[in-house]
């Protein structure tokens, strides 16, 4: 037996899966019915213990080709884990991956109750352990810190375009998912991936046709150096920001961000396009949101979350820049938002709209 202990004192008993280590993290939940491999390998989960609301996880095994990056989450909670996957692409079972990646977890717990508690009380800290400590005061003190430096790439990397090269894009890696690179490559973009601490002058000296600001983990306000470099890039090249890149751009322009009660995580988040009135089903993973009102006179709000009204996109036409909170590379719905990459290419080609 092992335990998940919440910072409010509630204890859930379950069975150990994954690595046999104790770990503290920020407890969050995701509502995706599939995509557990993408969740496990998304660097944006750095410092967090992830709970799946869907009860059975692991039934199609582990396919390394589908990984989005190196796993960064701190713990994994599921109702039931499948030890004998059925999928012709499967390479091995999910629990083996958790052990290899050093991720501790629990199964056999009431994930429905954990999700309900998180929705009602908000995100809280938690501990995965074998024995319940007498003193839990340390749980409340935990904070996700140094998230972006912990997941960014160590050096510059180059990825060639598929087919004929149309444009050269610079991607600032704050914890980038691999499908952002693939989405650009298949549209004819050669992609240079830069570490998060790269100076704006270095990127501009390489003379890309456009700059992408990636997703990533943690509190956006913690990344003061990144924000300062983004400020130098804006207006110099077309810029497209996703998730954390969306938040950092807002902060670079003097806007504000706020921590959400329990965030948006999963592949079924409805987002309304304020220009067309159409609602898109999107994939999301974030705990912070841009305060659109803080950018009045500087940007235009383009998308809002249909559930809670939070900001999901901004456009800055004078700076040839636009950003979104959701993941257009994730293909969440049958009519997904991958067209935003085409919009970015239009900007690199000289189209002034954002």
Image (spheres, grey):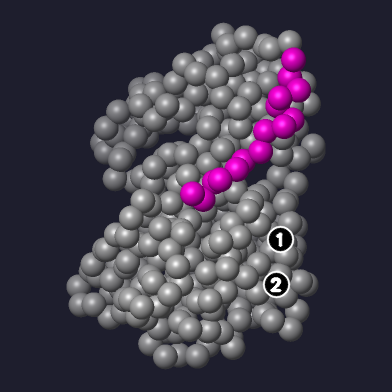
Indicate left or right for 159 with 255 as reference. left
Is residue 35 something one can see in this rendering?
A: no
Crowding around mark 2 (Cα neighbors within 10 Å: few <14, some 14 to 19, many 20+) is: few
Q: Which dot marks residue 66?
A: none
The image position of residue 35, as x and y in percent, is 45, 44
Asked which secondary structure carries label 1, the reply is strand
Magenta stretch in the rendered image:
135-149
Is 200 contained in the magenta span?
no
Look at 30% across and 40% down and name the residue there. 64
The image position of residue 97, as x and y in percent, is 37, 29
**Residue holding disc 1:** 257
Look at 27% across and 63% down and name the residue there. 158
Q: Which quadrant of the structure image shows residue 228? A: bottom right
Crowding around mark 1 (Cα neighbors within 10 Å: few <14, some 14 to 19, many 20+) is: some
Question: Between tags 2 and 1, which lies in front?
Answer: 2
- In this rendered view, identify the residue nearer to me: 146 or 6: 146
Indicate left or right for 63 with 17 as reference. left
- In this rendered view, identify the residue nearer to me: 73 or 202: 202
Look at 56% across and 45% down and name the residue there. 146
**Residue holding disc 2:** 254
- In this rendered view, identify the residue nearer to me: 117 or 85: 117
Q: Is residue 250 above or below residue 86?
A: below
Q: Which quadrant of the structure image shows residue 231? A: bottom right
The image position of residue 104, as x and y in percent, is 49, 24
């Amino acid at each position: 037996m092992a335990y998940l202990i919440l910072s409010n004192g509630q204890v859930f008993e379950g069975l150990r899966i994954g690595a046999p280590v104790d770990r503290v993290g920020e407890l969050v939940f995701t509502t995706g019915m599939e995509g557990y491999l993408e969740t496990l390998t998304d660097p944006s989960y750095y410092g967090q213990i992830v709970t799946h609301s869907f009860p059975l996880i692991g039934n199609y095994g582990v396919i390394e080709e589908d990984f989005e990056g190196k796993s960064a989450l701190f713990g994994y909670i599921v109702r039931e884990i499948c030890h004998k996957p059925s999928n012709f692409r499967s390479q091995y079972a999910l629990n083996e991956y958790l052990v290899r990646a050093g991720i501790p977890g629990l199964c056999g717990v009431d994930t429905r109750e954990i999700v309900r508690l998180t929705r009602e009380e908000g995100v809280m800290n938690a501990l995965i352990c074998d024995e319940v400590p007498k003193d839990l005061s340390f749980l409340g003190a935990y904070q996700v810190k140094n998230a972006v430096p912990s997941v960014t790439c160590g050096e510059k990397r180059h990825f060639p375009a598929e087919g004929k090269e149309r444009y050269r894009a610079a991607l600032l890696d704050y914890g980038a998912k691999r499908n952002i690179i693939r989405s650009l490559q298949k549209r004819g973009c050669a992609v240079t991936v830069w570490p998060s601490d790269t100076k704006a002058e270095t990127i501009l000296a390489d003379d890309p046709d456009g700059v992408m600001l990636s997703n990533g983990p943690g509190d956006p306000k913690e990344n003061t150096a990144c924000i300062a470099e983004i400020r130098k890039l804006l207006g110099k090249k077309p810029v497209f920001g996703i998730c954390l890149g969306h938040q950092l751009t807002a902060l670079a322009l003097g806007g504000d961000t706020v921590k959400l009660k329990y965030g948006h995580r999963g592949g079924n988040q409805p987002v309304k396009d304020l220009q067309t009135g159409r609602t898109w089903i999107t994939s999301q993973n974030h705990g912070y949101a841009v305060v659109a009102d803080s950018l009045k006179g500087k940007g235009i709000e383009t998308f809002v979350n249909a559930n809670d009204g939070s900001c999901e996109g901004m456009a800055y036409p004078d700076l040839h820049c636009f950003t979104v909170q959701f993941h257009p590379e994730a293909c969440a719905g049958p009519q997904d938002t991958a067209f935003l990459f085409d919009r970015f290419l239009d900007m690199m080609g000289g189209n002034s709209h954002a």
